Image: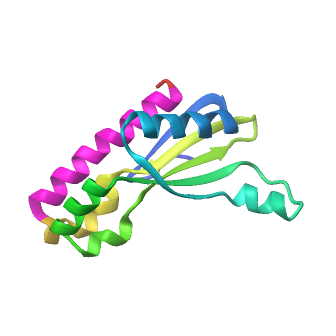
Amino acid sequence: ELESRPGWRVVSNSLGFNDLVSRVKDAIRDEKMLLVTQASASDGAKGQGIVIPGNRVMGVYRNDYARRMLKASVAAGIEAPIRLYVTENPDGSATLSWKTPSHVFAPYMEEGGAELKALATELDAVFEAIAAKATGH
């Protein structure tokens, strides 16, 4: 199971992997965000006949946030979309984790100034809301 680390939020719960993935997708829509990328090591392994614990990275963003971010710092654009990470635990439960937008954008704050700081703070709240809806916490 993933442990908390600097700049990360880690939310454990009793939901199974597939249930949590589904609920995260619903929460992304509920928060008016877009699921713009997905990658799953476990799906890839399954395609090769190998079973590993569930693992899915979901890139979440929206174009108005992208425009605001790029206006503040073109360099920060490499960090979008912000990723959510769902991992399956040995007991069958799943964990939702992410690097907070404030952490992700921290290296660009001097360049991006108040506009990037405001955007990151706003996105921190959006990602917390997605997590709360998805996990019930």
Q: In this image, 31 relative to 22: left or right?
A: left
> Would residue 28 be visible to someone looking at this image?
yes
Q: Which residues are magenta?
A: 113-135
**Could one spot residue 1 in this view of the protein?**
no
Q: Is residue 122 magenta?
A: yes
Q: Main secondary structure of the magenta part?
A: helix
Q: Nearer the viewer, residue 77 or 99?
A: 77
User: Residue 23 occupies which quadrant of the picture?
Assistant: top right
Q: How is the image coloured?
A: rainbow
Residue occupying the point 75% across, 35% down:
92
| Quarter residue 49 falls in | bottom right
Q: Please, which residue is most extreme toward the bottom here? A: 75
Q: Residue at x 55, y 46 (%)?
A: 3
**Residue found at x 79% / y 61%:** 45
Which residue is at the far left?
114
Tell me: residue 14, above or below residue 74.
above
| Front-most of residues 137 and 69 | 69
Q: Is residue 100 left or right of residue 88?
A: left
State the residue at coordinates (46%, 49%).
Answer: 98
As drawn, which residue projects farthest toward the top?
Answer: 136
